[in-house]
Amino acid sequence: MSATGIGASVRRKEDHRFITGQGRYTDDINRPGQAHAYFLRSPHAHATINTIDTKAAAKMPGVLGIFTGDDLTADKVGGLICGWMIHNKDGSPMRAGAHPALAQGKVRYVGDHVCVIVAETLAQARDASEAIVVDYSVLPAVVDTASAAKAKTVVHAEAPDNTVFNWHLGNKDETEKAFKAAKHVTKLDIVNNRLVPNPMEPRAAVGDYDQGEGAFTLYTTSQNPHVARLVLSAFIGIAPENKLRVIAPDVGGGFGSKIFIYAEETVCVWVAKKVGRPVKWTSDRSEAFLSDAHGRDHVTHAELATDAEGKITGLRVKTTANLGAYLSTFSSSVPTYLYAPLLSGSYDIPAIYAEVDAVYTNTAPVDAYRGAGRPEATFVVERLVEVAARELGKDPAKFRMQNYIKKFPHQTPVIMMYDAGNYGAAMKKALEIIDYKGVGKRKRDSARNGKLRGIGFSSYIEACGIAPSAAVGSLGAGVGLWESAEVRVNPIGTVEVLTGSHSHGQGHETTFAQLVSDRLGIPIENVSIVHGDTDKVQMGMGTYGSRSGAVGMSAIFRAVDKVIAKGKKVAAYVLEADEADIDFADGHFKVKGTDKALDFGSCALQAYVAHKFNGQDLEPGLKEGAFYDPTNFTFPAGVHICELEIDPATGVTHIERWAAVDDFGNVINPMIVEGQVHGGIAQGVGQALLEGAKYNSDGQLVTASFMDYCMPRAGDLPSFDVGMTVTPCPSNPLGIKGCGEAGAIAAPPAVINAITDALGHEDIAMPATPQAVWRAAQKSLKRMAAE
Amino acid sequence: MATVSMTVNGKAVTGTIDPRTLLVQFLRENLRLTGTHVGCDTSQCGACVVHVDGKAIKSCTTLALSLEGASVTTIEGLAVDGSLHPMQEAFREHHGLQCGFCTPGMIMAAVDIVNRRGHALDEQTIREDLDGNICRCTGYHNIVKAIAAGAEAMGGKAKPARQAAE
């Protein structure tokens, strides 16, 4: 392995600009003559709009224009879309209401977009917004997930029982039989708490319209600028694709929330033409809380059947998923195909049946957030398994190992064909790291100090490498989920790699360059990664679902194959040899059995000067592209163990140790992969201990700032012990499975299993705040005193 | 409108500004120093941390007019003559950043921790003193390592930083 090749912890190429303050985020971009947009948002969760009086505001200093939903309609700008069709149990399509970018007579959540004010400065636009008089008739709000379907208030007339769909997956009859025959049934009621993604960079957009060319440019905080352009062109109707350029420059974190095509970005690019000026909108944090798509928010009843030997024989769940007031871009796929197919976990379960009802409420739209459906599934499975082990009097590690899938490929009852894994190896390694044998002594030591110590397991699996286009098409996806790459070799042998993936913290500029430099045998500094601009990269599907390694890099791998193949043809002419006799290794094209060789840079030059071959027989140039469509999902898996201590006097939970052993298949850059694991665990610990978006019964978001919504800080977290096992993924050329979401998927059940172990009862919900833990600990202390 | 003069990264600057202009707006919009970021509106996240007269402050809750005559250092002013500050180098070496958005504020806060607490920082001290800075990407694991190493390097006792392999 070279110092910069595949498998090396190469320091990141992109870091220099970030550590010196030279990163270029959307809000750092200023266009000549730029004006500023401010959105007037609904203060009510549910109301009809009788009138919007903008007369006084329009005369305020600096105001260039105020626009409402009627203006969008007049310009034939369509509504926002949901790109995944789900069918009900009876085969009928889901019931979706319209999703206008600016309100059409009704607002459906606090923060919904009433109108936009464009002014010379942001302060002037804000000032003007306060002079707009909106006459609302306030309606009752539907807020609660579990009861939304029974509410008298209807969010969208198209869904009279507030139910978007009732969907199911699995083998119902066999599952019922398994439960009838079960020796023991474990039952749990679970709430998967609503989260706000909160990437540190708030969303932003700069819209620009070139009157001479009749073309729009949108700079925006997107994980997938090509999908944004596709949706804005083909569905919303801003402009045809050749007249709309979308640029996602440096993006300060996404975690899913920057996948979606939102109202603000849509309006910002449209309104630039209306006012004849570039227009910038930057979300403040309060707006982000109100209008970024939230995550999770499931209410679930789950049951696990076991036989007399402790073998898991069946699993069934009934879940209600809150999708908020409108269907966000991929919202419908999250509690369905990203959720139920993961309910087999790492276990050999012959019968599984899942029912999911998705409901509208007067809350912010809910969509994919780091893990997206898979954390919800893992929480169900890993809580059930942990509780079942305790009820059966079995060691939770041994109970898991007894029920692990051990032969691959393995077909689950819920779509997925697991291709490779070794779950027992990960468990063994995690037990060693955490020193499982010593936990009894550590618990006794804690007890002597008046503390409660617990240990919790999470043996997660996820489906990544999203996704085989034909497979997701058959499940309702509106697009294929391949990825594109183009490898452009310049005449002196330097390389630009154009990718449809987008990097917003993942380090693609380094890992992708490692791959290309390793395979072409050229210095890593000779490789540049180009992404995030639809004028440079023709088409791509973007970054989410831990797909950029498994799918994005596989596309690059294939394009490099083609470059090498073309290079062999060029080398054959130059070296006057048969093409079949040319080998490529260590950056040199060599004629087999001779010392005749051509280095990669010289080959590139020969390809462009084209003096040694006939242009009719071989085209000049060295530039190749590839579209890679995966043949299967990938299945990263692993074991996380959390050990923590509770102070029953204060309810404060302190995480003492964290062992994470993950199998991501082959790894390009271990330093970056470990960093992804750390960050994922932090978000999962946040969900388990700290974070929860709360609406009151009127539909007001009462956790709408960093003062009220508890983000994990450095003092809330431990350092993590991260280990790895490797079973290469058989379905892609690099053997990569993906690592971006694992920590966020694995962590929440590990924490809650540890807390319930410490407490000695299961009565705790997420987030397990000090107040909640204190109450639960008092119950434990009473019981312990009685014993 | 009002006029304010201060020194930013060693250069004298003067601006005519709306009196409600915050320091971060003055830096980003008037001086085009966009390395200082805005991540929240409640003075919680620390993406906007800069140094004023040698001490860390949150530029999102400081009126520019209140800094007449002050000396301000931003992330752009930390490297001297093109060579990185040891804390910048430590963040790169220890992978203390991912998306990079919180990074300028983290580095400025980290330098301030060293200035206040010295060069031998234990993990608990670093974690507690980072209370005013939020990162959503790294889980803080590598930020803590980077600050410990950067603190040591600022004291001149560190081994030479391993050359970044790029």
Image: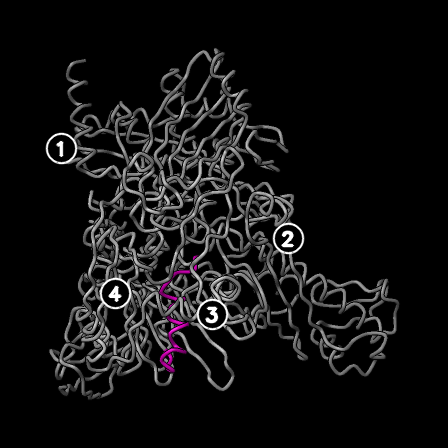
Marks 4 and 3, Cα distance to the nearest angstrom? 22 Å
Identify the amino acid type marked 2.
Asp
- Side (left or right) of A175 relative to A649: right
The residue tagged 2 is A629
Badges 4 and 1, same chain? yes
The residue tagged 3 is A238
Tag 3 or tag 4, which sits nearer the N-term?
A: 4
The residue tagged 4 is A40
The residue tagged 1 is A649
Note whether A698 is above or below A306 in the view shown: below
Tag 2 or tag 4, which sits nearer the N-term?
A: 4
- Residue contact at pointers 4 and 3, CB within 8 angstroms: no
Other-residue count near label 2 (Cα within 10 Å), few / some / many at <14 / 14–19 / ≥20: many
- Side (left or right) of B35 relative to A3: left
Horizontal and vertical percent for residue A37? 30, 72
- Seen from the viewer's position, the closer of residues A202 and A396 is A202
Note whether A489 is above or below B151 in the view shown: below
- Seen from the viewer's position, the closer of residues B108 and A294 is A294
Q: Main secondary structure of the magenta part?
A: helix
Marks 4 and 1, Cα distance to the nearest angstrom? 46 Å
* Residue pictured at 36% horizontal, 46% vertical: A157
